[in-house]
Amino acid sequence: MIQKAYIVPGQPHPLLAPEKNEGWARLRQAYEHVGKQIEASGAELILLYSTQWFSVIGHLFQTDPQPKWVLVDQNWYEYGEIPYEFRIDPAFGELYCRLCREHGMQAATVNYRGFPIDTGTVVALKLLTPNNAIPASVVSCNIYAEREETRALGFAARAAIERYGRKTIVVVVTNLSNRYEVAEIDPARDRISSQKDDEWNRKILEMLGEGRLEDVAQVAREFGREANADMGFKAIWWLGAVMGEHNRYDGKVWEYAPVWGTGNAIVELTPNERKEIEFEKEFDEGPVPAFEDIGTGLETHNILAELPPETPDRPDVVQTDKAAKPVGPYPHARRVGDLLFLSGIGPRRAGTNEIPEGIEAQTRAVVDNLRAILAEAGSSLEKILDVTVYLTDMKRDFDRFNKIYAEYFGAIQPTRTTVGVDSLPTPISVEMKVIASA
């Protein structure tokens, strides 16, 4: 459902005064190109996270369907007023908020006439969808949230998008380096505050241009220290979690320019599951604390798996608590005539979502899940007719997988296709999809 993601700046200069600086004008032009691209894309929702909408207690979600006001930026008031009237999708904001609450996060919706919308959100929506052709949803940036809470917020967003089922554009509003000039400057001579900041910005943009979003998320903390990145560049943690925490994107840097000493860029990321990459992650920040340690009560990779399925009570739909829950809005299986079509199932354990270590143990766990689903449908392993296997490391795991597979299916002899994939929705090594007789 996620079509593209964009990283955009939130300073008012490209909107209000593009004629004063060549770089501001280029940012304005790139913004407008991207806006036309989004409006022509068929997108049905823009989900926006802005580092300029600060929250202190938990996270807030804008649900006023038509916020209307006049903004005067507190720092750049001399550039004039920004009247705005936006089209917000309150149902998505309420869903997003509810999923956060269900997983132990502090969250609240905002539907209050005159509630101030931050400059970054206003600038982004005014330039990306000037005619309000696409409704938006906006989430705040908690100034105290560290990496794990911010990632949790991102995982909840991904779950909400999948549950909502609409084509979505994801936008983060953030600067790169964030060292402002503290004295008056000639706008025409605006430049990045320091050479070091500029070098770091260009390194980050080089990686994003190569589609290496997760690598950027892994070095965000160092970037934040070295270049005084905007809010520690935490927006990239949120974006990485929303997008699936990998590097399989086609990246494009539309523009990069200074705004009052800060580094501003417009970047486009398009998911490309078939993209060949040399390393899954070149950088790795290392282990992180469990969510319960920081008070969210949420486990990093399991938010999607823990969502209750929303399937109607129909005799052709098969669901069971004895197999791992689906990681999206779909059932374990469907019955069509005398056949059962099972959704892809991995090795997560029912009830705990624990993932066994090693391909052998994971293969046995997958078969346990298959057995439970088939039993719920009144069938069995012996009635499996066709198997599709997905392996994330064909070279390493194929032979060992085959050995375990033969123990269960050697005598049954279903047809089989084995496919190598870069990753699966949860951090697992194998998934199987089967067709069986009822």
Image (cartoon, helix red, strand yellow):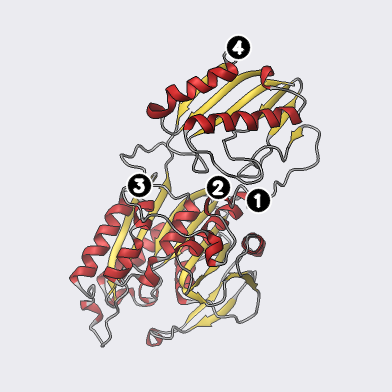
Residue 105 pos. (x, y %): 60, 66
Which numbered dot is residue 412? Answer: none
Q: CA distance from mark 4 to mark 3?
A: 40 Å
Viewer-closest of 364 and 141:
364
Question: Where residue 357 appears, x then y in whole percent?
Answer: 49, 38
User: Is 330 left or right of 30, judged from the image as shown?
Assistant: right
Name the foreground residue: 65 vs 17: 65
Q: Residues within 10 Å of mark 3 (few under 14, many from 20)?
A: some
Which structural element holds mark 4?
A: loop
Quadrant of the rendered structure where residue 217 is? bottom left
Q: Which residue is mark 3?
A: 281
Q: Identify the mark nearer the N-term, 1 or 2.
A: 2
Give the mark nearest the N terminus, 2 or 4.
2
Residue occupied by mark 4: 411
At 52% across and 54% down in the image, what residue appears? 300
Q: Nearer the viewer, mark 1 or mark 4?
A: 4
- Give the distance between the C-alpha atoms of the residues marked 1 and 2, in whole angstroms: 17 Å
Q: Nearer the viewer, residue 337 or 304?
A: 304
Mark 2: amino acid: Met
Circle 1 sits in a helix, a strand or a loop, which is it?
A: loop
The crowding category of the residue bearing disc 2, from other C-alpha atoms within 10 Å (few below 14, some 14 to 19, many at least 20), is: some
Residue 21 drawn at (x, y percent): 26, 74
Viewer-side label of 2, 4: 4
Determine whether, in the image, residue 234 is placed left or right of residue 87.
left
Q: Residue at x 48, y 55 (%)?
A: 241
Sooner in the amino-acid sequence: mark 3 or mark 2: 2
